[in-house]
Amino acid sequence: MFPDCRQAGYATFENYKNRHMKNTDTYRHLRGESVYLDDIPEVFGTLHALVYDSPIAHGKIKSIDYSEAEKLPGVIRIITYKDIPGENQIGAIIQDEELFAEDEVHFIGEPIALIVAESERIASDAKKLIHAEFEELPAVISPYEAKEKGCFIEAPRTFKIGDLKDGEKNSKYVFEGTAETGGQEHLYIETQGSYAVPKENGQITIYSSTQGPTAVQQITSRILGIPMNMIEVDVRRLGGAFGGKEDQATPWAVMVALAAHILNKPVKIVLSRHDDLRMTGKRHPYFANYRIGFSEDLKIQFYDVEFIQDAGAAADLSPAITERTLFHGNGSYFIPNAEITVFSCKTNLPPNTAFRGFGGPQGIFAIEAAMQHAADELNVPTYEIQKKNLLEDGDEFPYGQIAENAEAVSSWKAADKHFNIEKTYEEILKFNKENTKFKKGMSVTPLCFGISFTNTGLNQARALIHIYTDGSIGISTGAIEMGQGVNTKLKQVAAHIFSVPVSKIKLETTNTTRVANTSPTAASSGADLNGKAVEIAANKLLKRLKETAAEILHSKSEAIDIRDEIIFSQDKKTELTWDKLVSDAYWKRVKLSEKGHYATPEIHFDKTKEKGHPFVYHVYGTSVTTAIVDTIRGTYEIEEVKIVHDFGKSMNIFLDKGQVEGALIQGIGWLTTEEIRHDEKGRILANALSTYKVPDIHSVPKIVDIKELETEGDKHAILKSKAVGEPPFIYGTGSFFAVQNAVKAFNPNYKPDFNAPITHEKVLMGLYQD
Ligand code: LUZ
Ligand code: MOS
């Protein structure tokens, strides 16, 4: 039907101006033609690897006998820490994690050895022939226990604003309580994997399903004891990541690189779903103790909260995640007096890691629980209290940044105008009066999410653009395409600047030899940072091309304009086309390649004072959620989620709404049905999709209505189109409170707690609590 599709991608007949442009990968994804790690054609002689991991949560390794496994035909080698030529250390922020355990194991799933064999099957048979003896040590499974024993990843950190004592004095109502959120499995469709191919002279190329190619390169360099320039990391795309491949794609890549280095053979690993679920970290569970005070007119006077974070057995990204919890402790509210503290506790579980929102959602859940708590006690609708406390321009965040262009109030008002919050509330009251078999509940969720890596240094990116002699364009950046559509957006940026169709532009693989020292594609900032770098490089090229056109047309470069591949001079169409101009420029020996470097302006943060201006802007929004509970079965549905979201000026509303929908449903899953549990031995209980309940097509809200907040956009957002990956995850918060409010409407004896997820089981118990 569309013959062009097959050649240059789906967008061939599209135009960058089309904000309804589909992801340019969609067509090939649907046909199964897109290449993921396991689809890369294998080099002849490729070997396959499997990890032998710890079966216990904590203990000393007394002995391991690999001899039987090594004898199995087809087993090439079993690699342990003894084979590491460099340093056996993969910790990025804190160096506290071994690639392969040496004397002690710290969690079930901790890698001990890598079995390299002619096939995965042989490796898996060999694994069964490894015999190990451990001396079991007490395992700390609960972060409370860790805190009591003083097992921390780092010293606790506190953000402070005002004075709690002043807040206390001005408070008429004070509430104290606890809030908990659980872990969450990333469930990227493509499991972790990597493929390492040795090259001449000790060089190595690593294909990895990673959000952070530079992290893979750095840690490989450390483990192998060779310089970074010997290691090339190449990434075409990922089948999802959600933060799970920001840091935790690294060990697998390093392992196969090590094996390839030792054996001088290509080696590949692709984790089975079971191995992936068992060995990788999840979202951090958090336990919060809060005290909140309100004045007579329900303005927050103080908020004192202490978070206990379950970090697992090693630091991984926990210190950075801690930071983002601190930055989001106030939610979307102005709080004049606050103390927010996080204890990052070390337990004998797989190290928990980045997951969409990165500690932010956990911080926001606690303040929303405190708001709900106040509303329950004071017997007013929660939204009445929320509305009174929304951040406004000029308000100070607990970390010293002053709110600018705050859209908390405007998005709330827009949501109220579109969806009528009070009417929704009243209709539910009426429904609940008239029905017993079903009860309904609602909630409103304001959103405020800071954009920028909290570690200021990471907010930089580079791009490399080549214009080829036929006018086609190739772009390399540090951005990783993981389904979010960043490549489509980057093409739009370049197409916009050059005024050529998107089909003329190809996004190359992300490769550390073309774009070096990349930040991970994370913190919702992939399109902003890399897009700005593309913009800078493209503008330099455009300037030169305009000068060349001026020369050819005997005009001035200021008078030259390129519009849809046609060169205009003094507003008049000329015979000169884009393709001809590029070719002429080449023969005039004009440079047709450019680099761009972008470093986010205006941001800074002083950790010694815990004050600064860490975020280049914030993303805002408001959602209204309704839920219906079956009071006999305890089952429930999220009926509607209606959202007004601050996209800035979205450059691609198709992609952006897709992100809002996906994040919303992922957030709902986290707080309703997804439950990570371990037994007292530290063994994960839900280790398969039969026991771990992610939202499916039947459990998504019946109606999701997303409206764009009208704003001027933000000049620091790429083409004024704000970052969209993580913020809307927060809208999932509403599902917890909406379901809980429905239970309250049925059972007057229900004593609600704020322990998420609110599973169907918990709802049933709540309905009949007495
Ligand atoms: N990763 C990171 C992130 O290293 N720093 C961050 O601030 C961040 N925020 C969100 C997600 N990933
Ligand atoms: Mo992330 S949670 O890898 O943006």
Image: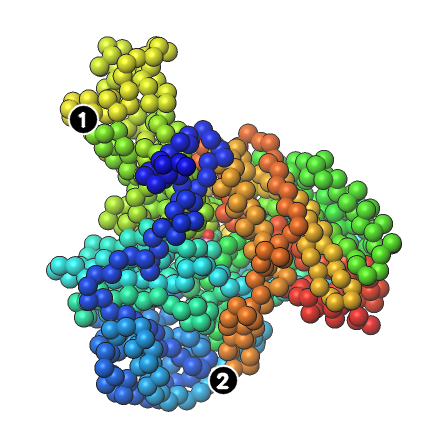
Q: Is residue 569 above or below residue 410?
A: above
Q: Amino acid at mark 1?
A: Tyr
Gap in Å between the C-alphas at discs 2 and 1? Answer: 70 Å
Left or right of residue 164, residue 441 in this image:
right
The foreground one among 592 and 88 is 592
Instruction: Please give the name of the residue rendered at 58% of the width and 51% of the height, measured from the top-left corner.
Output: 664
Q: Quadrant of the C terminus?
A: bottom right
Instruction: Please give the name of the residue rendered at 33% of the width and 38% of the height, measured from the top-left corner.
Output: 8
Q: Is residue 174 above or below residue 680?
A: above
Q: In which image quadrant can residue 11 be found? A: top left
| Residue 106 at least partly seen | yes
Q: Is residue 762 above or below residue 592?
A: below
Mark 2: which secondary structure?
loop
So how many labels did they put on this image?
Answer: 2
Q: Position of residue 521 (x, y in %)?
A: 40, 50
Q: Which residue is mark 2?
A: 138
The foreground one among 189 and 493 is 189
Instruction: Please give the name of the residue rendered at 32% of the width and 57% of the height, measured from the top-left corner.
Output: 39
Q: Position of residue 171 (x, y in %)?
A: 76, 52
Tag on residue 182? none
Q: Which residue is mark 1?
A: 586
Instruction: Please give the name of the residue rendered at 66% of the width and 66% of the height, measured from the top-left corner.
Output: 759
Closer to the N terminus: mark 2 or mark 1? 2
Q: Amino acid at mark 2?
A: Pro
